[in-house]
Image (tube, rainbow, N blue to C red):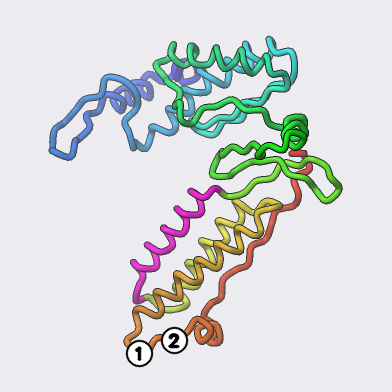
C-alpha cells in the first residue's frame, strides 16, 4: 500500500525494519513480531491510518456507496468509524459485508463496540410514539442522541461521556498531587489551560450543565489539595473563594451546528 504512493526504496526498507524490530517484554525477553504494527510505537498510528484508508475508506467510496439505494456516509478517526445509511437494507448489507472485508486484511471488529441501531429524525419520531428510551451512541468521547428543540423539532445533541469526564477529572487530580507544593498561580494557569481545552472540544449546545458540574468538581479537587498541604487549621471553601484563588474559566459553547439538524 505504501509503495503505491512512495517511490523511495530506502523509506520502504526503513518501514520494513521498523515493523520487524524486536519488542522488549517486561521479563527482558526480545520478541520479534510476525504481523501488525508494534503496540505503542510512534509510527503505528500513521501506518494504521494508511492501512484503513485502503481497507475501509476507498472500499466504501468505490464499492459500497454506488450500490446503496439511498445516501451513505462514512466518518472515521484512526480506528474508530461511524457509518450512516438512509435505507435500512443498505445498513444490513454493509453489516454483513464488513466482517468479511476486514478478515481479508487480517482485521477483526470488536463485538462489544460494534452495533447497528436506528437513529435520526424518523427513528426519533417512532421512539417517541412508542414511549421507548431514546437511542444513544458514543463516538469520539461524546454521547450522541436526538432531542426536541423549543420549537418541537428534532435536533442532534452531544454530551461528554461519563468515561471522558472521569478520565479528565482523574488526570487533573493526579497533576495537582504531582504539583502539590507549586504556587497558587501555577495551579491556576494549569487548571485554566486544562478546562479551556476540555470546553473547546466538548462545548456543544446542550453540554453546558455537564460542563458546569465538571468545573465544580475540578474546583473542589483543587480546594482539597490546598487544604491538605497546609499545616494551619483547615479553611472552608468560601474562605478560598474570598481570597480570589478559585479563578477558573466558565464554559463557552460553540455556535449551533446547523448542518447536524
The residue depicted at 55 percent of the width and 13 percent of the height is 96
Image quadrant containing the C terminus = top right
In the displayed structure image, the side of residue 28 where residue 183 appears, left or right:
right
Residue placed farthest to the front in the image? 130
Q: Position of residue 156 (x, y in %)?
A: 72, 41
Viewer-side residue, 66 vs 123 = 123
The answer to which image quadrant residue 13 occupies is top left
Magenta part, dominant SS: helix
Question: Dot 2: within a 10 Å radius of its alpha carbon, few (fewer than 14), some, or many (20 or more) residues?
Answer: few
Q: Which mark is residue 235?
A: 2
Q: Which residues are magenta?
A: 161-181
Viewer-side residue, 202 vs 209 = 209
Residue placed farthest to the bottom in the image? 232
The residue depicted at 32 percent of the width and 26 percent of the height is 14
Q: Is residue 168 magenta?
A: yes
Secondary structure at badge 2 equals loop
Callout count: 2
- Vertical relation: 83 (above or below) 189: above
Which residue is tagged 1?
232
The residue depicted at 30 percent of the width and 28 percent of the height is 18
Q: Is residue 162 magenta?
A: yes
- Vertical relation: 88 (above or below) 233: above
Q: Position of residue 82 (x, y in %)?
A: 59, 29
Q: Which mark is residue 224?
A: none
The residue depicted at 34 percent of the width and 27 percent of the height is 37
In the displayed structure image, the side of residue 1 where residue 129 appears, left or right:
right
Query: Marks 1 and 2: CB-CB under 8 Å?
Result: yes
Viewer-side residue, 59 vs 20 = 59
The answer to which image quadrant residue 33 occupies is top left
Secondary structure at badge 1 equals loop
* Alpha carbon separation for disc pair 1 and 2: 8 Å
Amino acid at each position: 500500500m505504501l509503495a503505491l504512493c512512495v517511490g523511495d526504496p530506502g523509506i520502504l526498507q526503513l518501514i520494513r525494519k521498523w515493523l520487524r524490530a524486536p519488542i522488549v517484554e517486561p521479563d527482558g525477553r526480545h520478541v520479534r513480531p510476525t504481523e501488525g504494527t508494534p503496540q505503542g510505537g510512534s509510527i503505528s498510528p500513521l501506518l494504521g491510518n494508511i492501512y484503513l484508508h485502503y481497507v475501509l475508506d476507498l472500499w466504501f467510496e468505490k464499492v459500497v456507496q454506488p450500490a446503496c439505494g439511498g445516501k451513505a456516509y462514512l466518518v472515521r478517526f484512526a480506528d474508530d468509524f461511524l457509518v450512516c445509511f438512509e435505507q435500512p437494507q443498505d445498513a444490513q448489507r454493509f453489516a454483513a459485508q464488513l466482517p468479511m472485508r476486514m478478515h481479508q486484511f487480517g482485521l477483526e471488529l470488536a463485538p462489544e463496540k460494534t452495533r447497528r441501531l436506528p437513529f435520526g429524525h424518523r427513528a426519533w419520531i417512532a421512539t417517541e410514539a412508542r414511549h421507548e428510551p431514546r437511542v444513544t451512541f458514543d463516538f469520539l468521547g461524546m454521547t450522541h442522541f436526538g432531542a426536541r428543540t423549543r420549537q418541537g423539532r428534532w435536533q442532534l445533541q452531544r454530551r461528554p461521556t461519563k468515561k471522558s469526564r472521569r478520565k479528565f477529572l482523574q488526570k487533573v487530580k493526579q497533576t495537582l498531587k504531582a504539583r502539590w507544593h507549586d504556587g497558587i498561580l501555577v495551579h491556576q494557569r494549569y487548571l485554566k489551560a486544562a478546562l479551556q481545552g476540555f470546553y473547546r472540544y466538548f462545548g456543544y449546545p446542550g453540554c453546558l450543565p455537564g460542563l458546569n458540574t465538571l468545573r465544580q468538581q475540578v474546583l473542589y479537587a483543587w480546594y482539597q489539595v490546598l487544604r491538605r498541604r497546609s499545616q494551619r487549621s483547615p479553611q472552608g471553601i468560601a474562605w478560598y473563594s474570598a481570597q480570589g484563588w478559585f479563578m477558573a474559566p466558565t464554559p463557552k459553547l460553540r455556535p449551533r451546528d446547523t448542518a447536524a439538524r
